[in-house]
Image (cartoon, rainbow, N blue to C red):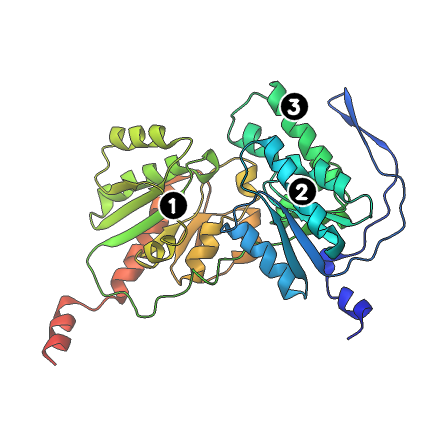
Amino acid sequence: MAKGERMEQLPLLGTCPERRRRIVGFLGFFGILYDAPVTSIPVRPSICTFGYHDRTSPRYWTICRYIEGQGGTLRECHTDVRGFVGKMRALRAQWKTMKSDCDTVLVTFPGHYLVPLAWLLTRRPRKTLLFDAFVSLYDSNVSDRRLFSPWHPRAWMAFLMDIVSCHLADRVLVDTQAQKEFFCRRFRLSPERVEVVYLRAREDLFKPPAQQRSAHAAFDVFFYGSYIPLQGIETILRAAAIVQKNNGHIRFMLVGGGQTQAEMRALSQALQLQNVTFRPPVGIEELPSLIRDADLCLGIFGTSDKALRVIPHKVYDAVACGVPVVTADTPAIRERFASHPLVSLCPPGDPAALANAILERAHRSAMKRPSDGQNRSSHRQ
C-alpha cells in the first residue's frame, strides 16, 4: 500500500487546516493570536505522546489503541518528575533524542499547560500538534467542582489555558459529540479541528467472568469514583435510603475517595443507612473483580452542565464485564448507550427515579434466580 493511501485511513491525523491571523476577545482584556496561514502539512502515522499522563488510565489506553488501530506507530515522551518546571525540562530533553523519528506530537491529558512547550518544540522542523483536551480546565474546576469563584485569578488562568492550548493545537481531541459542541461554542473552535475519540474499557482488564456468579440472597450494588460533584453521590445515598425502606436484601458498596467524601459519609449517618458500605480507593487492577462480583453498577447522577456532556468510564467498564449499570439519562450517554440492554437510564439528580431503577433491576434478578425448592432438587440430583 502506498504511503499516501495509508494516510487517508487516519482521520484523526488529517492534514493541518490552514489557519488565519485574527484576534479573539478574552474577558474584554486578553486576545489570542492565531498563526498566519501555513501550507498544509501531510501527517505520517508516526506519533509521539507527550506529557506526564497516567499510563494505566482508561483515557491514555483508549488514545493509544485508537491510533494503533488506524496503523499509527507510537513513541512516548513521558516524565514522572515532580514540579512543573522539572517536568518541562525532562520532556524537552527527551524530545531532543526522538524529534527526528516523529512527525506528529500528541499532548496527552492532563496537558493543557504543556501545549505551549509542545508548540514551540514542533515549529522547527514543523510537525503536527494534537492535543487530547478531554475536558475543560475551567469547566471542571470552576463550573463543576466549584473550587474557585469565576472571579478568582486561578479561574481566569484556567479559562486562558483552555483557549491557548486549544488554539495552538492543530487538532483537539474530546470524548463525546456533546463535548465537541461545547468546545466549539465556548472556545470558538471550528468543528473541523475537533475530533471525538470515545472512551473504551481496557480490554486487557475488563471482561466478562469465566463462569456465572453463584446464586445468593443479597443484591449487590457497586459504585466507584473520586467523589467529585459530577458523580452525584448524594443522589446515590438518598436513593439508598429509599431502597432501604423497600428491600432489605439490597446492599451498596461505594469505593473511592476525594472532594466530597467526608460530606457524603456524614450524609450517610444522617440518613441512618445500614445498607451502605464505604471502602477506600483501590488500584485499577482490582476493579474488574469488584465489578464482576456486583449485581448492578452505578454510573454518574450529577446535574451540572459537564455531567450532561460526558460518558463515565465506569459505564464502559461495567458493560465490558457484562454487568448491568444504571446511570443518568444525558445527551452524551445516548450517543453510545441509548438502547443497550445492560444500561438503564434515569433522570440526573433524582433519588426516587434511581431507587426505582435499582428496585426494578433487583426484581428482574430475583425472577431469574431458581427458587429454594429448585435448588434443593437440583442438589439431590
What is the spatial separation of the Cα atoms under label 1 and label 2, in whole angstroms?
Answer: 38 Å
Residue 106 x %, y %: 68, 49
Asked if one can make out residue 315 in the rendered structure from this viewpoint, the answer is: yes
Tag 2 near tag 3, CB within 8 Å: no
Nearer mark to the viewer, of 2 and 3 = 2
Residue 49 is labelled as: none
Instruction: Give the quadrant of the N terminus.
Output: bottom right
Residue 345 x %, y %: 45, 51
Residue underneath mark 3: 156
Query: Along the horizontal axis of the image, is 8 left or right of 213?
Result: right
Tag 3, which secondary structure? helix
What is the spatial separation of the Cα atoms under label 2 and label 3, in whole angstroms?
Answer: 31 Å
Q: In this view, does 319 lie above or below 96?
A: below
Whichever of labels 1 and 2 marks the residue nearer the N terminus, that label is: 2
Residue 113 x %, y %: 65, 34
Residue 224 is labelled as: 1
